[in-house]
Image (cartoon, helix red, strand yellow):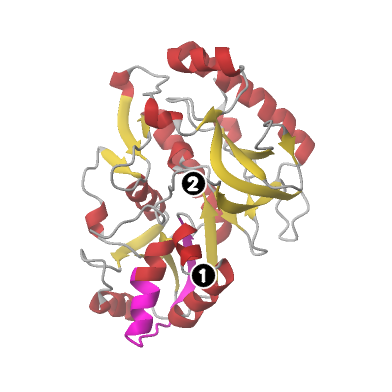
Amino acid sequence: MLDYQKIFELPVFGMKRDEKDAFFRSALSELTDHHRDNCEAYRRITDVAGRDSPLPVRLFKEYELLSVPREAVIKTMTSSGTTGQAVSRIFLDRDTSARQSKALSKIVSQFIGKTRLPMLIVDSPAVLKDRNMFSARGAGILGFSMLGRDLTWALDENMEPDMTIIDNFSKKHEGENVLLFGFTFMIWQHFIQALVSREETLAFEGILVHGGGWKKMADQSVDNERFKQTVRDVTGIGRVCNYYGMVEQTGSIFMECEQGHLHASVFSDIRILDGQNFAPVEQKRGLIECASLLPTSYPGHRLLTEDEGELLGVDDCPCGRAGKYFRVYGRVKGAEIRGCSDTYERR
């Protein structure tokens, strides 16, 4: 098994390409051996597809993939899905769950600082119902909530802004940096647009972190820059930071830097593959393959997504972070929609 204590001591964005390529080749090979030894379904799949082939992410909807005894599972997470759509089921043991939380904290603290900020969650507490069966949305909120303090929910159970609570939070933390967190479309639809329609503006200082897909935003002709500017205008928040991640690799998310680029950390890596022959490509759009060192209770260390992206560079982002940086264009044609924002349906 990997020496996770040493991995967590490595700089989060400090490993250059050659060193990281060698490190990941060895680490992923070790994880592949672990999952082939402990997950019969994964072994049979890789016997056919090739030992080092990424697992198509949709297989988690069709198979129960575990690399630990079922009695070791402490938490099952499900992907986001529209009504009637199958969802992935991700089985976590205690070690994988703890590792995901620790990695998330180390990655995000590189952007928001190590001090826990007062946190306004732009969602409804109704999303947290069954604590043993986490949706991706609930898991995301719980994961990020560890990074804040004075956790406050901005929306009521009808997904309407609770202005009394929001105003009290604003007055209580006036002059402090705060952390706002939520999923992109919910923030836009139920917070920003609702405030605009009420002609309300806020005067927060700090950072907004958001993720969950852009399909619904694109349907409304809202791109990243318009989203950021409107958030700044309505809330006063100076920094708006998007992230890319998936429930099948919780914890090892890709955060957007000051230059608008998504970055792989020491816990993750990406490759862009040609959609026709699955060969790696650079400086060209293709399918995104995501690697994560975190999961040992299920074979999610090397996944083929249904998202299209482009590698923009390695080790030379003007923000100063080493490693790969990239852009996501969205779902490939014909793929099911997913992501907490894009699958959200108002009940």
Circle 2 sits on which residue?
104
Q: Position of residue 105 (x, y in %)?
A: 48, 48
Residue 259 sits in quarter: bottom right
The answer to whether residue 341 is left or right of residue 223 is left
Three-letter amino acid code at disc 1?
Ser
The numbered disc on residue 221 is: 1
Q: Nearer the viewer, residue 310 or 317?
A: 310
The answer to whether residue 312 is left or right of residue 340 is right
Query: Is residue 143 found inside the magenta-colored segment of the image?
Result: no
Q: Position of residue 185 (x, y in %)?
A: 41, 63
Three-letter amino acid code at disc 2?
Leu
Residues in magenta, as a range: 190-211
Residue found at x 60% / y 34%: 7
The numbered mark, 2 or 1, whose residue comes first in the sequence reads 2
Badge 1 local density, few (<14 within 10 Å), some, or many (20+)?
A: few
Residue found at x 46% / y 69%: 220
Q: Extreme front residue here?
A: 334
Q: Is residue 150 visible?
A: yes
Q: Nearer the viewer, residue 243 or 165?
A: 243
Looking at the rendered image, the quarter that the N terminus falls into is top right
Residue found at x 76% / y 34%: 19
